[in-house]
Image (cartoon, helix red, strand yellow):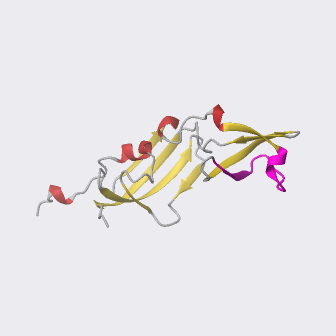
Amino acid sequence: MSDQPDTVHRIGDDMEVTLHFTLKLEDGTVVDSTRDKQPATFQVGDGNLPPGFEAPLEGLAEGDTGSYQIAPEHAFGQHNPQNVQLLKRDDFDDIEPEVGTVMSFADAAGGELPGVIASIDGEQVEVDFNHPLAGRTLNFEVEVIQVRPATTH
């Protein structure tokens, strides 16, 4: 029996992918992983994975594994100083801001925007609205469990 080449699905457009992944900082600190839970399933191009994470997976098939270094501009962007805002302590109502706390703020469109309290100086509170992983190079390790054509509902 010979393997039919068209039975091997590879990761690409219009494919649904199920995989285990581990996301690590350069020093090996694990940021996120599916290893101890359900694998992740997504459709290529659906926005669940930033394009920088999808690109190295292209062409992989069921059973393949890989480890990729993702530069900040292909992951969560560079740290942008314009995303760091100074607020007044009075803006926090009854909440006492603490350095390192992640808080939710309303953005201009009325949506939720997470920000990290970066520093507190008297009545000034510095809030960093950059993604916590902005500016970080990440190591992305994957184990492809299943690749199949995506079904449209």
Residue 99 horizontal/vertical position (percent): 78, 46
Image quadrant where residue 15 sits: bottom left
* Side of 141 relative to 26 (left or right): left
* Image quadrant in which you'd find residue 68: top left
| Relative to 51, residue 80 above or below | above
98 or 58, which lies in front? 98
Q: Residue at x 84, y 52 (%)?
A: 96
Quarter containing the N terminus: bottom left
Number of numbered discs on residues: 0
**Range shown magenta:** 89-107
Nearest to the observer: residue 14 or residue 92: 92
Question: At x 22% / y 57%, what residue is drawn?
Answer: 8
Q: Residue at x 37, y 43 (%)?
A: 55
**Relative image position of residue 133 (x, y in whole percent):** 59, 43
Check the picture and name the quadrant holding the C terminus: bottom left
Q: Is residue 5 left or right of residue 73?
A: left
Q: Nearer the viewer, residue 49 or 136?
A: 49
Q: Identify the residue shown where x is 35% and y is 53%.
A: 44
